[in-house]
Image: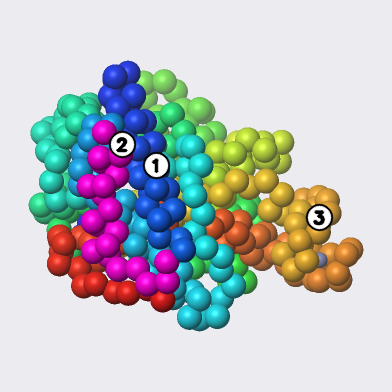
Amino acid sequence: MIAYKFRMYPNKEQIEKLEFALDTCRRAYNMMLEELNNQVIIDKAQIQAMLPDLKICEPKFKEVYSKTLQYECYRLFSNLSALKVLKENHKKVGRLRFKGKGWFKTINYNQSGFSLESNKLYLSKIGNIRIKVHRELNGKIKQIQIKREIDRWYATIITDKKRQIICGEKIIGIDLGISNYLVDSDGNKIENPKILEQNFKKLKHLQKELSRKKKGSSNRRKARIRLSKFYQKIANQRNDFLHKLTTNLVKKCKIIVMEDLDIKQMAQQKYFNARNMLDCSWDKFTQLLDYKAENAGCQIVKVNPKNTTKICSKCGSMQNMPLYRRTYECANCGFVLDRDHNSAINILNKFSGQEMSCVERIPNTLLGQGNSMKQESLT
Ligand SMILES: [Zn+2]
């Protein structure tokens, strides 16, 4: 399957309906969880059978597309199963917790209840929503996942077309920076190639040449072509670097945890100048990573960058880390680690610390198999 993510522009009424669907899913999830939390053995058929009962108790549930709610049954089952696996591996895990208001950010339309025509996405019980389809779809649509990201709405459209890259198995945290482009939680480092900086002298020279040539002259035209070709060369080098990097990450990982760069960039603005900002091209990196991850079935999790450099990844205590200090030396426990490696572990921990990493994933078993998923019991 391939996934495509598009921005949607629901109107006011549609937003209300979407919000209502999100909250209804959350309530259904919580109600089912309450019933199941004290049970020892749970099978999927039982979870499914609970839905009609819920609709009798809460007639408003009928205002949400039935398969969307049913999907929450699967999700709950998938979470409970994942919890079971963690327990079997002797990981310390609690039980699933109830989801507070605003926690649910996605709803799903699986197999039916939707249609897509040029720039309108029809969703059952919601209506025709304006959508910007900026890429051509390949294959037949299997599932649509609607997601709220702060005040924006996105549709991830999943088709049955085979992927070109398949994601790996690792779960890593990555820290993006200026001197090291990327350091992951295993300590692997990718140096920043600083492509612009390396070519800066020649670029300045070409710009100067251009400004010296007489306006309208053929020499000026030639100088302009030389300059733009050089720009293109720099851009190609950078794209090449970013393409290789993002492909490798996705091939290796099933979950990549990174900082929310909008927040990070805002917080670090004073350390940036226009040049090294451009040389990082984090926006492009994120764009490529998101796109490749989507298609490979790898999940990108964005966490708040607050204190990721200051926390000791071993003991959890905090200390100030001015930018020049490249090594983290914990004053509390004596732990010593490369600054960025320490941050990458903290970034990963921010994710692991959240309950149940699997929750936001799309259970793969659902796609294309309808209800024929084999029943498993949970002990
Ligand atoms: Zn420490």
Give the distance between the C-alpha atoms of the residues marked 3 and 1, in whole angstroms.
38 Å
Q: Going 40% across and 60% down the picture, which residue do you hit?
A: 36
Check if residue 81 falls in the magenta segment.
Answer: no
Q: For this view, does 330 lie left or right of residue 171? A: right
Q: Which residue is mark 2?
A: 58
Check if residue 52 falls in the magenta segment.
Answer: yes
Q: Report if the CB atoms under discs 2 and 1 are less than 8 Å apart.
A: yes
Q: Which residue is mark 1?
A: 27
Q: For this view, does 240 lie left or right of residue 133? A: right
The kind of residue tagged 1 is Arg
Which quarter of the image is occupied by the C terminus? bottom left
Residue 127 position within the rendered picture, expressed as x and y whole percent measured from the top left: 18, 27
Q: Going 34% across and 57% down the picture, which residue do you hit?
A: 75
Q: Which residue is mark 3?
A: 318
Residue 187 position within the rendered picture, expressed as x and y whole percent measured from the top left: 62, 71
Q: Quadrant of ligand 1?
A: bottom right
Give the distance between the C-alpha atoms of the residues marked 2 and 3, in whole angstroms.
47 Å
- Is residue 142 among the parts visible in the rendering? yes
Q: Going 23% across and 64% down the picture, which residue do you hit?
A: 45
